[in-house]
Image (cartoon, grey):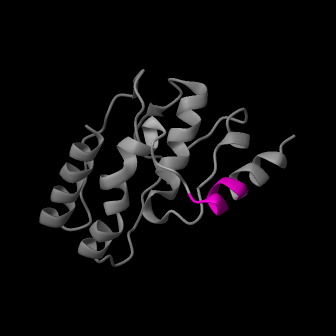
Amino acid sequence: MYTLNLICVYICRLSKKPCVKFDKLIPYTSNKLSPFNSQNTFISRDVIPHYMVLPFVGRMDDIWGGYLIEKLFGSCVVYNNATVYQERNPQDLVKNLENETIGYRNTKMFISGDYQLEDRVKITYEKYKEYFK
């Protein structure tokens, strides 16, 4: 489902150009793991010691960091309308898509624990958490 959602977003972005406007939504949540990125995101003080934009993983750095805290905190994400407007800088959408193939190929394995992060990612994440002890 995750990959299908991302593909739909990219089809919209590629066909309509980067400025795609979505209807306002009613806040919602789920008891399933669901992706979110670090843009316009509010994070509880209790979660901050566990949430990190993971270095060295490319375009999935914030989304995979989000999956880590969802595994720890369960149903902890609420989706709502953006609180700010982002005026996007020029983008090469095809290059973005190429950079996100790590997610299309590996997110399911990452969630199940079958994808091994590089040691330098794990070490950095553990050092980050130490600052909150």
- The percent position of residue 58, horizontal first and vertical second, equals 47, 66
Vertical comparison of 125 with 109: above or below:
below
- The percent position of residue 1, horizontal first and vertical second, equals 25, 37
Vertical comparison of 70 with 90: above or below:
above
Highlighted magenta segment, given as a residue range: 118-123
Give the side of residue 21 with respect to residue 34, left or right: left
Q: As drawn, which residue projects farthest toward the top?
A: 31
Q: As drawn, which residue projects farthest toward the right?
A: 133
Give the side of residue 49 with respect to residue 71, left or right: right
Q: Nearer the viewer, residue 50 or 17?
A: 50
The residue at the point 52 percent across, 43 percent down is 66
Vertical comparison of 64 with 14: above or below:
above
Q: Nearer the viewer, residue 86 or 130?
A: 130
Residue 87, by quadrant, is bottom left
The residue at the point 44 percent across, 36 percent down is 112
Give the side of residue 65 with respect to residue 98, left or right: right
